[in-house]
Image (cartoon, rainbow, N blue to C red):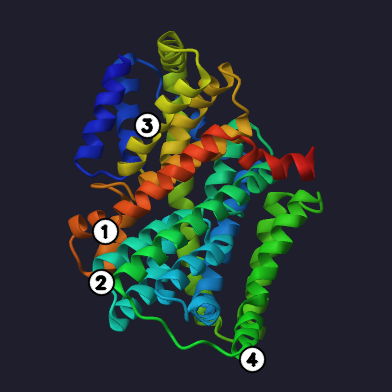
């Protein structure tokens, strides 16, 4: 009977149903065929959504929207141009730098690609960069967002596993920075080889002004991260503080938010949050069915029968998650697969915090993996270039991202150093 559930889910995905609908339809048919009372649907959906830490997600989504609409994106890009625009390929490097700074605000890769890409891709084309390269840089750099804290997928992973949100935030910091710097190095070498333009060197005064413009956004990330780590407030309280902070900065400091913009932003955040909660509810129902059918135990046993070597198991999990990440949205993939694979990883003595970073990094790389990477589609639509060209241009970035994944997988201290330093 479990194969009916999985088959229906896959068929719905093939016909491009939204993930939440695919989960809901497959679960409904399974329950009807199995004779299980349909009253289990609202019960399991509610239990999946009734988690205190999940209340932080609407807050962080609203914060990102407020800061983006309040002019933060343009200020971050300007600041990065002042810092590194004079280097060969400086505009492309600024694109990556902006993603790393914007990561602390958005926390999601697709929103990063859409917001920064809408500004940077046309600007790079105008300066003489190849369109496919501009799109590939934007899509690849956006994967840094959910690794560097605060991160919505990290909150989901913590909810599913009972791990500390603060520890997960800290665990993602070094891998995220490592990924961002690695992408910058590849971008620089390609830019030198192709002789892409560089901007005029900014004066110290311009750099200082740019820093002051972005200071308030960077300060918010600092407040959120160290407030959670220091035990000053919970992630849910942090999200509320972030919303109030974003409103004050957008209205009083940047002065680009008015009542109409705020209303639009709130409605957009409500729609995004509602769709995400529906997804979480259906995913919890889907996961309950998998547990009833003992699929997690089956998968775990099969992997461990194949090998009990930690690195072989992690290799198999990495391959699976990258493949899934190419066609499934990150949070949906986490909800369905993370609890199952976490048990396998723990069975071969992988630290749960370390595994959470590995899983998330895999799924982020999947977003830019040809031919179905979601971020590739977003970037190509902005740049008005074929997905094939963007995929080809993005191969160097994909290979360096895989290299970072290998390092994070083989050397747990890259992820665990900061959590152990600050929270153990």
What percent of the width, then of the height, locates residue 120? 38, 74
Regarding residue 50, the answer to whether it shows in the image is: no
Which residue is the site of mark 4?
A: 205
Question: Closer to the N terminus: mark 3 or mark 1?
Answer: 3
Q: Is the N terminus in the top left, top right, bottom left or bottom right quadrant?
A: top left
Which residue is the site of mark 2?
A: 130
Asked whether disc 3 touches disc 1, contact meaning CB atoms under 8 Å apart, the reply is no
Which of these two is toward me, 422 or 312? 312
Q: In what element is the residue under mark 1? A: helix
Marking on residue 64: none
Which residue is the site of mark 3?
A: 319
Regarding residue 63, the answer to whether it shows in the image is: yes
As drawn, the residue found furthest toward the top would be 305
| Alpha carbon distance from label 1 to label 4 | 36 Å
| Alpha carbon distance from label 1 to label 2 | 10 Å
Marking on residue 393: 1
Residue 113 falls in which quadrant of the image? bottom left
Residue 258 falls in which quadrant of the image? bottom right
Question: Closer to the N terminus: mark 4 or mark 2?
Answer: 2
What percent of the width, then of the height, locates residue 198? 40, 81
- Total marks in image: 4
Q: Residue at x 54, y 39 (%)?
A: 408
| Alpha carbon distance from label 3 to label 4 | 48 Å
Identify whether 124 is placed above or below 340: below
Q: Residue at x 30, y 42 (%)?
A: 327
Asked whether disc 1 touches disc 4, contact meaning CB atoms under 8 Å apart, the reply is no
Which of these two is toward me, 320 or 292? 320
| Alpha carbon distance from label 3 to label 1 | 22 Å
Q: Is the C terminus in the top left, top right, bottom left or bottom right quadrant?
A: top right
Identify whether 130 is placed above or below 340: below
Question: Closer to the N terminus: mark 1 or mark 4?
Answer: 4
Q: Nearer the viewer, mark 3 or mark 2?
A: 2
């Amino acid at each position: 009977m479990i194969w009916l559930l999985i088959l229906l889910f896959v068929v719905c995905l093939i016909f491009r149903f939204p993930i939440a609908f695919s989960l809901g339809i497959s679960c409904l048919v399974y329950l009807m065929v199995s004779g299980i009372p349909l009253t289990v649907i609202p019960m399991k959906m509610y239990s999946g959504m009734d988690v205190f830490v999940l209340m932080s997600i609407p807050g962080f989504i609203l914060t990102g929207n407020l800061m983006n609409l309040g002019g933060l994106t343009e200020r971050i890009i300007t600041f990065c141009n002042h810092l590194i625009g004079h280097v060969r390929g400086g505009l492309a490097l600024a694109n990556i730098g902006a993603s790393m700074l914007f990561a602390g605000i958005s926390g999601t890769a697709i929103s990063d690609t859409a917001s920064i890409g809408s500004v940077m891709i046309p600007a790079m084309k105008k300066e003489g960069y190849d369109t496919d390269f501009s799109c590939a840089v934007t899509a690849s750099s956006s994967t840094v967002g959910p690794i560097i804290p605060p991160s919505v997928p990290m909150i989901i992973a913590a909810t599913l596993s009972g791990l500390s949100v603060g520890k997960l935030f800290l665990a993602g910091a070094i891998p995220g920075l490592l990924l961002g710097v690695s992408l910058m190095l590849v971008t620089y070498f390609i830019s030198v080889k192709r002789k892409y333009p560089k901007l005029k060197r900014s004066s110290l005064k311009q750099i200082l002004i740019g820093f002051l413009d972005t200071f308030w956004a960077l300060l918010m990330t600092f407040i959120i991260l160290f407030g959670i780590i220091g035990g000053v407030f919970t992630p849910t309280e942090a999200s509320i503080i972030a919303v109030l902070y974003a409103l004050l900065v957008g209205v009083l400091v940047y002065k680009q938010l008015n009542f109409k913009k705020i209303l639009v932003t709130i409605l957009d955040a409500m729609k995004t949050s509602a769709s995400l909660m529906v997804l979480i509810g259906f995913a919890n129902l889907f996961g309950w069915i998998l547990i009833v059918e003992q699929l997690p135990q089956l998968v775990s046993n099969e992997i461990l029968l194949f090998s009990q070597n930690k690195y072989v198991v992690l290799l198999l999990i990495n391959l699976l998650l990258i493949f899934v990440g190419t066609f499934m949205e990150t949070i949906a993939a986490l909800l369905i697969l993370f609890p199952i694979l976490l048990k396998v990883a723990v069975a071969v003595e992988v630290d749960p915090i370390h595994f959470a970073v590995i899983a998330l990094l895999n799924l982020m790389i999947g977003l830019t993996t040809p031919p179905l990477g979601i971020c590739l589609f977003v970037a190509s639509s902005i740049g008005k270039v074929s997905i094939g060209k963007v995929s080809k241009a993005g191969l160097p970035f994909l290979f360096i991202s895989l290299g970072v994944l290998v390092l994070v997988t083989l050397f747990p201290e890259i992820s665990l150093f900061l959590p152990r330093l600050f929270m153990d």
